[in-house]
Image (cartoon, grey):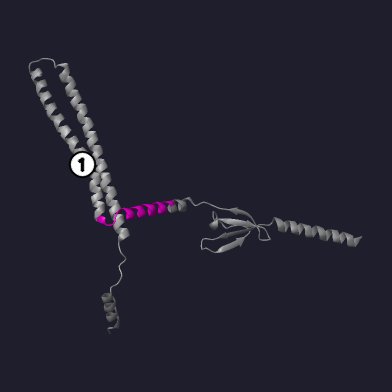
Amino acid sequence: MQKISMLIIFSLLAMSNMAAAEGKKIVKWVDSKGVTQYGDKMPASDAGRNNSEMNTQGMVIKKKITTNKSNDLQDQQKLEQDRKDKILLASYTKAEEIDLAKERNLELDKAALQALTQQKINITNRTARNNKLADGFKARKIPLPAYLIKELKLSKTETANIDKQMAQRKLSMAATDARYTEEKVRFVALKQPTLQPTPQANNMAATLTTQP
């Protein structure tokens, strides 16, 4: 009877140990130095890193993949810059071509600005004539005709609209100039050849090192 009791106790202990072992988890992760670590939990310094949970038999039972938004953003920016660089290098063979492209793109704004300037001159001249007529009516103490009042108001409205359009054209030209200037700087940086020491420079360096 005593032997049976002991067997039952041993069996219960074995089952308890097995259950505990099966419930135990091991965490696997790579620390900031790139070293793979194992433990029952991750330290606070490595919190947020990718990790896996394994059972005592080494089987992965859970994976935790964390997303680093900062790194993702940097990767996206790098990919976008690489794409722009490829287009830039495919579009031009030398920096002077970028200057020509800029001038071509500025031609439309320059032509529009010139036309707006002429329109403003015409309106200014017309306004001057109407103001002279208005002064004549005022000198004779005669009320201004309705058509003249309308013309003076219209001139102010047209002048304001032209000034607004001219300002927009100037902003557009400034943006175009800035864009092509930036592209030219980037193009030159990408095309800049790596400077290699010439044979003469190598000979001179060898001579200087052998001199007492």
> Which of the two residues, 201 or 52, is positioned nearer the viewer here?
201
Query: Could you say where residue 171 lies in the image, as x and y percent from the top left?
Result: 26, 41
Which quarter of the figure is the N terminus placed in?
Answer: bottom right
Residue visible at 26% across and 76% down in the picture: 200
- Examine the image and state in which quarter residue 144 appears: top left
Q: Quadrant of the C terminus?
A: bottom left
Which residues, given as a range, are shown in magenta? 76-95
Q: Can residue 187 be found in the magenta stretch?
A: no
Q: Position of residue 111 (x, y in %)?
A: 20, 40
Q: Nearer the viewer, residue 142 or 4?
A: 142
Magenta stretch secondary structure, dominant = helix
* Residue drawn at x 22%, y 27% as measured from the top left: 157
Q: Residues within 10 Å of mark 1 (few under 14, many from 20)?
A: some
Q: What kind of element bears circle 1?
A: helix
- Asked whether, in this view, residue 8 is left or right of residue 76, the answer is right
Q: Quadrant of residue 195?
A: bottom left
